Amino acid sequence: METGPTGGGLGGDDLSQSSPATAISRWSFEVSRRYQHILDRTVPHILYRWIACLVLVLIYAVRVYFVQGFYIITYGLGIYLLNLLMGFLSPQVDPEMQDGPSLPTRGSDEFRPFVRRLPEFKFWFAISLFIIVGYDLIDD
């Protein structure tokens, strides 16, 4: 006869409500939800986001100047920022690779405006995040 738990569950592998894994999972979900809420609240404030990003860049530049080093990190940061800028300024679909005319020829054809490969919010977020990471890499 079987002496294990009966009840259609996973037996001993299921997590109870008070297990540490469930508590950590709940805590990480709550932190990520609050973080996403903060990011969502910054979406309409384009000017303030870019001003904050400029302040971060200036703080980074002053820190590199006073530390007198870490130019390789700054060089990598510059290359990454140029890559982001190219993605921001380029279209999502390359018109040279597309077959046929690019303008609508019939009334039923839909006009597609310029769609960026990298949206503005993701561009700002990537710049800000990488500046913060680069700032943390510079250690006294």
Image (cartoon, rainbow, N blue to C red):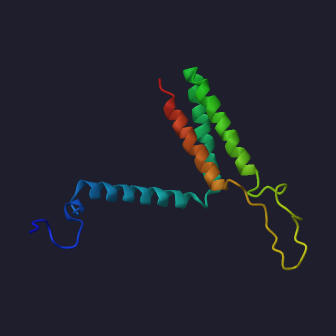
Name the residue: 47% across, 23% down: 140
Rendering quarter of residue 32: bottom left
Q: Which quadrant would residue 53 be assigned to in this image?
A: top right
> Considering only vertical position in the picture, is 81 above or below 29?
above
Q: On the image, which quarter does residue 84 sit in?
A: top right
Residue lying at the far front of the rendered structure = 1
Q: Position of residue 98 (x, y in %)?
A: 82, 60
- Left or right: 80 with respect to 134? right
Left-right relation of 46 to 32 = right
Number of numbered tags placed on the structure image: 0
Q: Considering only vertical position in the picture, is 130 above or below 69? A: below
Q: Position of residue 107 (x, y in %)?
A: 87, 79
Quadrant holding the N terminus: bottom left
- Name, please, the residue furthest toward the top: 68
Q: Is residue 129 left or right of residue 102?
A: left
Q: Is residue 40 left or right of residue 5?
A: right
34 in relation to 54, above or below: below
Residue at the location (61% across, 30% down)?
74
Residue at point 56%, 57% (across, down)? 42
Q: Nearer the viewer, residue 20 or 128?
A: 20
Horizontal and vertical percent for residue 134?
Answer: 55, 34
**Quick check: 91 above or below 67?**
below
Residue 15, how many percent across, how many down? Answer: 24, 61
Q: Choose between 38 and 106: the one closer to the eye.
A: 106
